[in-house]
């Protein structure tokens, strides 16, 4: 299954980011730009077309991330396009037409990153905290969690507990 969504906030903006992740990512890119996908991890200016009608939708940056070196751990693309409602909606309408391609649920890209061992559960939850942060203190706390401070601490405690448990089991034997 391939998923897609508007990753930047909804509404009118200078730039909108539409993200695609899954096994059909390369096909989606090729169909939308009438060309092979750009070099991996290189932002490339491309014209974006409606593959059915051939009409130009917009011109924007396309970035291709090859599995496993992407946020989700799958093939992934980002389309950085003009943030008008019409442009975003047309691209989403085109993506909807691809077989085995569906709109992502909220948080699904992060869920995939967790399932593909790209991030741990604490980082996954802290990304949501960062997105919803309204104060500087909330932002700072979320950043600390994303950087792995809590994960490193908990992993250290786990190692100490496992070591202690092994000593206890050896004594019992």
Image: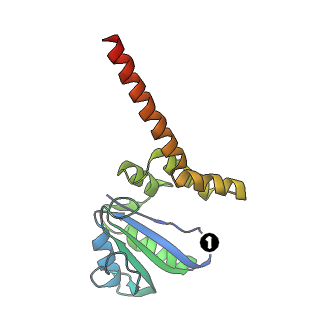
Residue plotted at (28% across, 84% down): 35
Residue at 39% over, 67% down? 20
Quick one: 91 or 21, which is closer to the camera? 21
Task: Bin the neighbour count of mark 1 within 10 Å (Cα to Cα): few under 14, some 14-19, many 20 and up.
Answer: few
Residue 128, x across and y down, in percent: 56, 53
Q: Is residue 115 above or below residue 87?
A: above
Viewed as shown, does residue 65 lie left or right of 134? left
Image quadrant holding the N terminus, namely: bottom left
The image quadrant that residue 137 belongs to is bottom right
Q: Label 1, secondary structure: give it.
A: loop
Q: Nearer the viewer, residue 67 or 152?
A: 152
Please indicate whether residue 83 sits to the left or right of residue 70 in the image: right
Residue shown at 65%/56% (left/top)? Answer: 140
> Residue 101 in the image: x percent, y percent?
35, 63
Relative image position of residue 143 (x, y in whole percent): 59, 56
Q: Which residue sits at x=54%, y=45%? A: 150
């Amino acid at each position: 299954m391939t998923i897609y969504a508007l990753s930047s906030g909804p509404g009118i903006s200078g730039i909108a980011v539409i993200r695609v992740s899954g096994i059909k990512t390369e096909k989606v890119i090729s169909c939308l730009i009438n060309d092979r996908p750009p070099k991996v991890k290189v932002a490339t200016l491309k014209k974006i077309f409606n593959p059915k009608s051939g009409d130009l939708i917009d011109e924007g940056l396309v970035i291709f991330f090859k599995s496993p070196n992407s946020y989700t751990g799958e093939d992934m693309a980002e389309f950085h396009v003009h943030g008008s409602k019409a442009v975003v909606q047309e691209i989403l309408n085109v993506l909807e037409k691809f077989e085995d391609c569906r709109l992502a649920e909220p948080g699904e890209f992060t869920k995939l990153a967790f399932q593909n061992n790209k991030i741990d559960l604490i980082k996954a939850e802290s990304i949501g905290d960062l997105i919803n942060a309204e104060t500087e203190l909330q932002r700072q706390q979320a950043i600390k969690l994303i950087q792995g401070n809590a994960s490193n601490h908990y992993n250290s405690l786990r190692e100490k507990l496992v070591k202690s448990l092994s000593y206890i089991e050896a004594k019992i034997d």
